[in-house]
Image: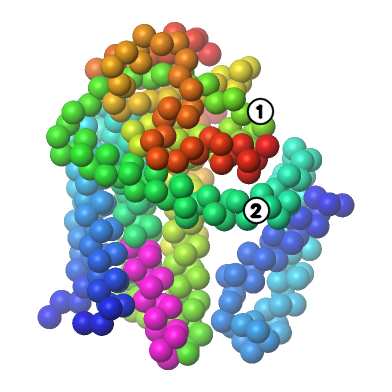
């Protein structure tokens, strides 16, 4: 029997792959930026749940740091797209 | 199934449903601004709910087993959700502003006051 | 001096939250507390001029903090839920009528504008795109501009929210 937590992580992984479709297709640079942002959000949500599955809190800590770093990189990409860099 | 488990699985289900809606919106909507509506709101809300399931799990295990590592799990999951909610809104605004500055106009728009304002 | 104390205090608080459950003094161990104090002092020395750049300490008022704690899980979360049901409806039916409108905020401080812009991004059908620095007006991408609104030059910020009056809450908290 598959655990509900593992099922959630599988669903989130499928969603990441679907968001990657937009990352590849996206006609403009901001489209790709928001697709990347979506993938990052889903990765954080999945990592918090993985922390429960493996009973390791370090996954949640890594998720927090990953979220903050992805925020900084998204801001950087936005500045570059807006021509302010 | 106990009541706590039902709450947990309901939170997980809500989270997955809204994340799915967000990604479908990302694939279906016609231009960058409407796609941003779907991703920002729906994935933030969905991720808050999946984190809420983890918080409920951590607190219930903490009160039933009195092991402080479950309390740490709950607090850190809460911090991850708070970071997510805060940073997603700011980065969505940053990308929207950058997209408008780089000359991308909203498709199908009935009005565009920002282009008229010439900032 | 106040800036240093505020920054160091917030850094120490964050350290305490992150290391809760490590030992026996309350929830913390002795070594974590010593390390937290040292890092908080270092943090306060480095970052005091960045965190408290505006030199206004309105948010130290406990009544404002209490209102902030009520605001986020209360009216804000209600509007967030409504926004998501709205987005779900739009994703399924694709009934959209997008447009960028100018919204008069009526707020004066940077903190107020920041909170209003973030609240707008996460509430029904709206996404903040730009800010007019001179008048503090916000430009908002609305996914479903209601009939007649595209003719009007300026829209009041209270018209964007259906259930709760978020701009009034933000004014009480931030100004």
Image check: B67 left or right of A12? Answer: right
Query: SS at mark 1?
Result: loop
**Magenta residues: mostly which secondary structure?**
helix
Q: Quadrant of residue A48?
A: bottom left
Q: Quadrant of residue C137?
A: top right
Q: Which residue is mark 2?
A: C65
Which residue shows up at 28% across the image and 34% down it? B35
Neighbours of disc 2 within 10 Å: few (<14), some (14-19), many (20+): some
Above or below A37: residue C126 = above
- The reply to whether residue C77 is in sight is yes
Residue range in magenta is: B50-65
Q: Position of residue B112 (x, y in %)?
A: 38, 14
Give the chain letter at badge 2: C
Q: Position of residue B86 (x, y in %)?
A: 49, 48
Give the chain letter at badge 1: C
Q: Which mark is residue C108?
A: 1
Image check: A21 left or right of C114? Answer: left
Q: Does the stretch in magenta take in A34?
A: no
Query: SS at mark 2?
Result: helix
Q: Position of residue A67 (x, y in %)?
A: 45, 55
Above or below C59: residue B94 = above
* Of pointers 1 and 2, the one earlier in the residue sequence: 2
Picture colour scheme? rainbow
Looking at the rendered image, the quarter that the N terminus of chain B falls into is: bottom left
């Amino acid at each position: 029997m598959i655990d509900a937590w593992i099922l959630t992580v599988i669903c989130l992984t499928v969603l990441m792959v679907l968001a990657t479709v937009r990352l590849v297709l996206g006609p403009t640079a901001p489209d790709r930026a928001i697709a990347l942002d979506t993938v990052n959000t889903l990765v954080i949500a999945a990592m918090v749940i993985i922390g429960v599955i493996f009973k390791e809190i370090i996954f949640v800590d890594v998720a927090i740091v990953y979220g903050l770093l992805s925020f900084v990189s998204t801001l950087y990409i936005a500045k570059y797209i807006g021509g302010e860099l | 199934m106990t009541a706590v488990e039902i709450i947990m699985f309901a939170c997980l289900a809500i989270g997955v449903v809204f994340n799915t809606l967000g990604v479908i919106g990302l694939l279906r909507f016609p231009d960058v601004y409407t796609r941003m509506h779907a991703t920002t709101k729906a994935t933030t809300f969905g991720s808050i709910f999946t984190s809420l399931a983890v918080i409920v799990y951590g607190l219930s295990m903490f009160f039933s087993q009195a092991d402080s590592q479950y309390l740490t799990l709950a607090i850190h999951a809460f911090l991850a959700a708070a970071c997510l909610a805060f940073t997603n809104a700011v980065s969505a605004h940053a990308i929207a502003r950058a997209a408008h500055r780089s000359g991308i106009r909203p498709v199908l728009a009935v009005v565009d006051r920002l282009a008229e304002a010439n900032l | 001096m106040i800036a240093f104390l505020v920054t160091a205090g917030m850094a120490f608080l964050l350290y305490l939250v992150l290391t809760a459950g490590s030992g026996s003094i309350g929830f913390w161990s002795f070594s974590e507390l010593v390390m937290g104090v040292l890092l908080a002092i270092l943090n306060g020395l480095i970052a005091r001029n960045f965190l408290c750049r505006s030199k206004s300490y309105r948010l130290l008022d406990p009544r404002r903090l209490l209102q902030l704690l009520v605001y986020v899980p209360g009216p804000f979360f209600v509007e967030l839920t409504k926004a998501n049901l709205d987005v779900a409806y739009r994703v399924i039916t694709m009934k959209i009528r997008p447009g960028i409108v100018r919204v008069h905020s009526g707020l004066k401080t940077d903190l107020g504008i920041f909170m209003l812009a973030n609240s707008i991004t996460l509430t029904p059908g709206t996404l903040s795109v730009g800010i007019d620095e001179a008048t503090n007006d916000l430009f908002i991408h609305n996914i479903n501009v209601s009939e007649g609104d595209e003719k009007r030059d300026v829209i009041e910020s209270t018209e964007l929210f259906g259930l709760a009056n978020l701009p009034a809450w933000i004014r009480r908290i931030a100004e």
